Amino acid sequence: MKDRAELVIIGGGVSGLGTAYQLAKRGFTDIVVIERDYFGSGATGRCGGGIRQQFSEEYNIILARESVRMFEKMSDELGQDIGFRQGGYLILAHTEKEAEDLRRNVRLQNSLDVPSMYMEPEEALEIVPELNIEGLSAAAYCPTDGVAQPFLVIKGYVDNLRKMGVELMDHTEVLDIKVENGEIRKVITDKGDIETRMVLNAAGAWSRNIAKMVGVELPNKPYRHEIMATEHMKPWLKPMVISFHNGVYFSQSHDGEIVGGIGDPNEPSSYNIKSSLEFLERFTSVVVRYIPIMRKVKVMRQWAGLYDVTPDARPILGPVDELPGFIQAHGYSGHGFMIHPMVTKLLAEYIIDGKTSIDIEPLNLRRYTSGETIQEKNVVG
Amino acid sequence: MAENGEKIVCRCMDVTVDDIMKAIEDGYTDIESIKRVTGLGRGPCQGKTCIPIAIGIIARATKKHPDEVGYITPRPPVKPVFFELLADEEGESE
Ligand SMILES: Cc1cc2nc3c(=O)[nH]c(=O)nc-3n(C[C@H](O)[C@H](O)[C@H](O)COP(=O)(O)OP(=O)(O)OC[C@H]3O[C@@H](n4cnc5c(N)ncnc54)[C@H](O)[C@@H]3O)c2cc1C
Ligand code: FES
């Protein structure tokens, strides 16, 4: 293991490995990435893989749009099929208010070159003929949204980073960070120490524990989010189907399983990742109501992971004022996989150039003390 | 993928000894990673037969103790269940 590096990245999910990859691509390879367990063992490997541009807020729409452009090229670029499939996202609305929100969001998305469309429930049947439209007020569809396989993305990054000479340490835990005279000096792990002046905190739901090591308080909270997969079937469900009404989402992956979950507004903040029968009951109840033929489909396995949630449901990116060498890359609030390509590219720009092609200032930790937050409303779960 | 004469480890998902050896060469040495890299253990039997075999192969190839290679967290439900047996279709499920 190296005992000195220009940058130490803590966390081997899409945030940490994605940033390492974007940096290495530009020739910045004096990096050590540290992951406590195996790469992708955190939220990333447990994630649904959904990629959507249909957000309610301009900044997120742009990050997602740019990320989709990067996902489109990712399999070729990484030399690894990432299972990217653009079947679109179909959003279902139940009330007049939700229909109005969809109309407003589609207008905003279209003005930013995202080809989403507002539709009447009957029109949604053209996309999912099996849909029961009873009780629906409207739908929105964006054909360039889609899904990819998170673990294949992780594998693509890991394989490329090893070839590019970046040091990857899995099964290694960061225990402490030493600061002297307002500067980072050293990262202490259970396999030895690494001298460095710069640390990227990409530890997902555990980022707040990393921040505590240097005396920085983060507002992030961990929440369990449960998910399941069905038996393998021939392809029949084209889009990811979601509803903000009940927090449900489900799609068919490129290998034929239906993968889906549902948020629970009563879930308390904790590090619990146990699976529950109650989740399966709630999820299947909503799904058979939308797609009655799903009654005859079998649940094969279920699992859970942690959402790393911030007060405004937007990530925290960039340096902290008290300790400029301590850079944040977390707080993705349940939609980190889909925006990570562009976010990690911007972080690499910040680290190499000191400036970014899209301003990341609005996502600085500072916003919580200055009171300048904008809420993202289109969050599932 | 399995071709004539290759030794299959995971019958459900068509994963061979060679697929596992390739993953080890690529630097993956624990069962959780190898399961995800190769697709091993994701078939209808959910790895009941193939995972113990794979752990043995990985342990031998990496000279690790099988415990270090890891054991896959069992994913409930233990038996596949139909949606209709779980769903509450009467209640206020919106
Ligand atoms: C069930 C579920 C479904 C989801 N579905 C979607 C979806 O459809 N689309 C989408 O865009 N997003 C989805 N998400 C969210 C997405 O998974 C996350 O936003 C994203 O993966 C976050 O990546 P990350 O790299 O920030 O965190 P993680 O992947 O959690 O990585 C952080 C890593 O840091 C490591 N770590 C922590 N502490 C230490 C330490 N002290 N030393 C060393 N390493 C440490 C952890 O082991 C972990 O691997 C979902 C999440 C869950 C849980
Ligand atoms: S033999 Fe591997 S999953 Fe069934």
Image (cartoon, rainbow, N blue to C red):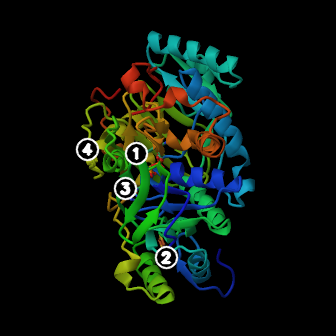
Left/right placement of residue A82 relative to residue A288 reads right
Which image quadrant for residue B70?
Answer: bottom left
* Residue A119 in the image, given as x and y percentages of width and height: 61, 18
Q: Chain of mark 3?
A: A
The answer to whether the beta carbon of the residue marked 3 is less than 8 Å from any atom of ligand 1 is no
Label 4 amino acid? Ser
- In the picture shown, does residue B67 fall above or below A87? below
Tell me, yes or no, whether dots 4 and 3 are on the same chain.
Answer: yes
The C terminus of chain A lies in which quarter of the figure? Answer: top left
Q: Chain of mark 4?
A: A
| Residue tagged 3 | A177
Label drawn at residue A182: 1
Q: Are marks 1 and 3 in contact (CB under 8 Å)?
A: no
Q: Give the CA distance from mark 2 to mark 4.
A: 30 Å
Q: Give the CA distance from mark 4 to mark 3.
A: 24 Å
Which image quadrant for residue A347?
Answer: top right
Q: Are marks 2 and 4 in contact (CB under 8 Å)?
A: no
Secondary structure at numbered mark 2: loop
Is residue A128 shown to the viewer in this render? no
| Residue tagged 4 | A270
Crowding at dot 2, Cα within 10 Å, few <14 / some 14-19 / many 20+, comes out as many
Crowding at dot 1, Cα within 10 Å, few <14 / some 14-19 / many 20+, comes out as few
* Residue B19 in the image, given as x and y percentages of width and height: 60, 77
Q: Give the CA distance from mark 1 to mark 2.
A: 39 Å
Left/right placement of residue B91 relative to residue A90 reads left
| Residue tagged 2 | B29
Tell me, yes or no, whether dots 2 and 3 are on the same chain.
Answer: no
Q: Residue at x 70, y 54 (%)?
A: A25
Label 1 amino acid? Gly
Label 2 amino acid? Thr
